[in-house]
Image: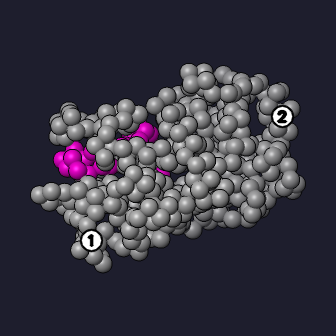
Amino acid sequence: MSTADVIVIGLGAMGSAAAFQLAKSGQRVIGIDRHAPPHDQGSSHGETRISRQAIGEGAAYVPLVLRSHEIWREIEEETRQSLLLTCGALVLSPRQGAAAHHGKSDFLLQTAASAEAFGIQHELLDAAEVGARYPQLRLRGDEIGYFEPGGGLVFPERCIEAQIALAKRHGAQIRTGERVLEWTSTAHGVRVRTDLDVYEADQLVLAAGAWMPGIAGPALTCLALQRQTLHWFEAEEPEQYQADRFPVFIWIHGSGPEDLFYGFPIVPGSQGVKVARETTRFMSATADGLDRVVAESESQAMFDGHVAGRLKRVRSTCLRAAACIYTVTPDNDFVIDRHPEQPRVLLVSACSGHGFKHSAAIGEAIAQIARGGQTSGLASFGLGRLLGAGGQSQVPQQDRIQ
């Protein structure tokens, strides 16, 4: 049986960051994952993820993404890998009406308000200005645009791989290909039993993403899974969609919850313009039961419903497609808190489909908490808000994340 100060279950976006930061801070760490991260079985794959500095989902997220950008630059210096590409971020929505995204109304205006509050460089553009800057877009003329030059994209697989490598460099034991069967409390900490071994530690970090509803127990039964699809469409003139000419974008083009899509420039080594939408339909299956095959009809529906008539000279030929999972809370915000019945267990999920951009800083914050510190930046993500009056957390107030 191996022992450690902290065990981290799940080594995706949050878990790899937590394992790295914990090991870097001098903690003895064991990281466990049923697969071999980075992998394509969960939520942290697909080549690129949008990173925005001003966050329309709420001001509490802004310090996290700003710190994450700093950490990724630090990791780039240490590993000589490119992790963050600041090609600019564009948010489009109808000028009239409160366009919503991730459960938040007036998403574009809330993004602009966050930028103002935190001094983030940005511009508000009308449709003519957006069209002049990005002629690749076919606009109706009634749009408003928010542009942020410091936004862009991160490469999730590279980020995970780099942080796991750095965790190992700082002494962490990384155990992949092990399925966690159960975790239990002991007199002095926690015990984790996998299909291969047994481990004990003072504290446990549960960061298992789409597997959290099953592994965390009743505390997170409120979480739901959503299957999302990613599509790479052929561009007639690929050079027009490269990162030196085209930003990442979120385009809200209607008033319905699924009247939006988002996309990326063509990054080096890739082909096609990557786009995706966000379905609000919940899966009935578990994470292991996700249908990871994207049907041709799904790609055609994506093209017909969102891409056609909006991205110029992008063909309906889908070069590649993939499926991933969102793990979503009822209010579309995060859960980062101590377990309501087990104060030595930290819950670090769900990310509700917008977590990767914040993950590096959350890993750093988890390391601080595990060492007995406090951080005000995570107070908004407590589990208590999702529990009814009769299910209020039993963790003493002084032990809760503040």
Q: Residue placed at 62% from the left, 53% from the top?
A: 77
Marking on residue 375: none
Badge 1 element:
strand
Of residue 149 and residue 332, the one placed in the foreground of this image is 149
Image x and y of residue 23, in percent: 40, 57
Q: Is residue 146 magenta?
A: no
Picture quarter with the C terminus: top left
**340 relative to 34 in the view: left or right:** left
Marking on residue 2: 1
Q: Amino acid at mark 2?
A: Arg
Q: Residue placed at 69% from the left, 33% from the top?
A: 148
Q: Is residue 344 magenta?
A: yes
The magenta-colored residue range is 326-347
Image x and y of residue 390, in percent: 17, 36
Indicate the quadrant where residue 123 lies: top right
Q: Which residue is mark 2?
A: 133
Please tell me whether mark 1 or mark 2 is closer to you in this view.
1
User: Can you say whether 67 is above or below 24 in the image?
Assistant: above
Task: Please give the count of numbered marks on the rendered protein.
Answer: 2
Q: Amino acid at mark 1?
A: Ser
Mark 1 and mark 2 lie on one chain; the one further toward the N terminus is 1
**217 relative to 31 in the view: left or right:** left
Q: How is the image coloured?
A: one colour
Q: Residue placed at 36% from the left, 73% from the top?
A: 178
Marks 1 and 2 sit apart, C-alpha to C-alpha, by 57 Å
Q: Residues within 10 Å of mark 1 (few under 14, many from 20)?
A: few
Indicate the quadrant where residue 180 lies: bottom left
Q: Residue placed at 36% from the left, 35% from the top?
A: 375
User: Can you say whether 378 is above or below 347 in the image?
Assistant: above
Q: Residues within 10 Å of mark 2 (few under 14, many from 20)?
A: few
Image x and y of residue 51, in percent: 61, 43
